[in-house]
Amino acid sequence: MTEMPKFLQEVNGQLWLVEDERENMKISYRINKVIYSEQSPFQHVMIVDSCDFGNMLVLDGVVQTTSLDGHIYNEMITHIPLSIHPNAERVLIIGGGDCGAAREAAKYPHLKEIDMVEIDELVVKACKEHLQEVSGNLSDPRVNFIFNDGMKHVKEYRNHYDVIIVDSSDPVGPAKALFERSFYEDIYGALKEDGLMVCQSQSPLFHRDVMKQTFDNISDLFPVTKPYYATVPTYPGAFWSFTLGSKKYDSVHVKEFDKDTRYVNQSILNSCFDLPAFLRLK
Ligand code: SAM
């Protein structure tokens, strides 16, 4: 019999995934079975079949995305920037190993290149095979998979990309550098003179320091800085923030949103920067 991954617990004959990265909060999901479990050079990669969320991607014991609600996050991190930039051709996605953001970006026929720089090839392999509700049948020839550290990749480019989407995991391990100021400086340099970026900036309830620091780092560099949020049941607290930094464009230009989506629509685009009072940072 194969050994049970260390992030799972058996309680009264039931299998549970217990996310316990926070001191005062543990989130438990009942699991039907483990579908994939491997240790990569970077992290433990697992796909589980959960009772309520369908298949889930779990990295080092932390849920990243699920069949049930992955579309909310992936649509919001992709369609907002691509509805603001009026004529993007080159897009870079950093992280995003579940392929959900690349799948959404591929819905824009005017994009010529979608570079996806993911540090861990095993995440892409596992999600393409076992998490197709999120990854889709992604075989668009414009998507270039580059297996490298996103931090190194952006240093190699100047004035190259129209839109950069930072779809990283939490700021620990290989993703820690993706929350540092020098990384945003390199992103600024890799963008064209009218380019824009977006990153996930964690929970406004539980990681307010990270959200605030991300806002400060981006607003020191970019003339336009706009946080927005979505409700993603999988993430602690369900509120999840994104922060947009733009060199030029500051509002959605799309008037008739026509992509095949389940969360983003024209009303969401029109109101995405309307924030609850507690979420306004300035
Ligand atoms: N939506 C998810 C969330 O907010 O939790 C994250 C999506 S995606 C699975 C995050 C990806 O970032 C992971 O596959 C991880 O391997 C990748 N990653 C972490 N650090 C990275 C780095 N330095 N360069 C490129 N990819 C990185």
Image (cartoon, rainbow, N blue to C red):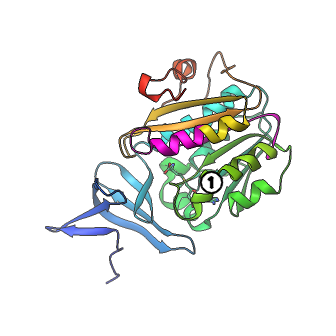
Residue at 63% x, 52% y: name it. 180
Give the image quarter of residue 69. Answer: top left
Q: Which residue is mark 1?
A: 178
Q: Residue furthest top?
A: 255
Residue 242 in the image: above or below residue 210: above
Q: Which residues are magenta?
A: 190-215
Quadrant placement of the C terminus: top right
Q: Position of residue 184 (x, y in %)?
A: 70, 47
How many badges with numbers are in the image?
1
**Amino acid tagged 1:** Leu
From what the image shows, is residue 21 above or below residue 269? below
Examine the image and state in which quarter residue 150 appears: bottom right
Mark 1 lies on a secondary structure that is helix
Residues 114 and 205: in front is 205
Residue at disc 1, CB closer than 8 Å to ligand 1: yes
Task: Please give the name of the residue rendered at 83% of the width and 52% of the height, measured from the top-left corner.
Answer: 157
**Residue 206 lies within the magenta run:** yes
Query: On the rendered image, what quadrant is the N terminus found in?
Result: bottom left
Question: Quick check: which quadrant has ligand 1?
Answer: bottom right
Task: Give the left or right position of residue 60, taking residue 112 as reference.
Answer: left
Badge 1 crowding class, 10 Å Cα cut-off, few under 14, some 14 to 19, many 20 or more, is: many
User: Which image quarter: residue 106?
Assistant: top right
Q: Residue at x 69, y 23 (%)?
A: 250
The percent coordinates of residue 204 (x first, y second) are 44, 38
Question: In the visual, does 30 lie left or right of 259?
Answer: left
User: Residue 107, can we see it?
Assistant: no
Q: Position of residue 131 (x, y in %)?
A: 48, 55
Q: Residue 128 or 219: which is nearer the viewer?
A: 219
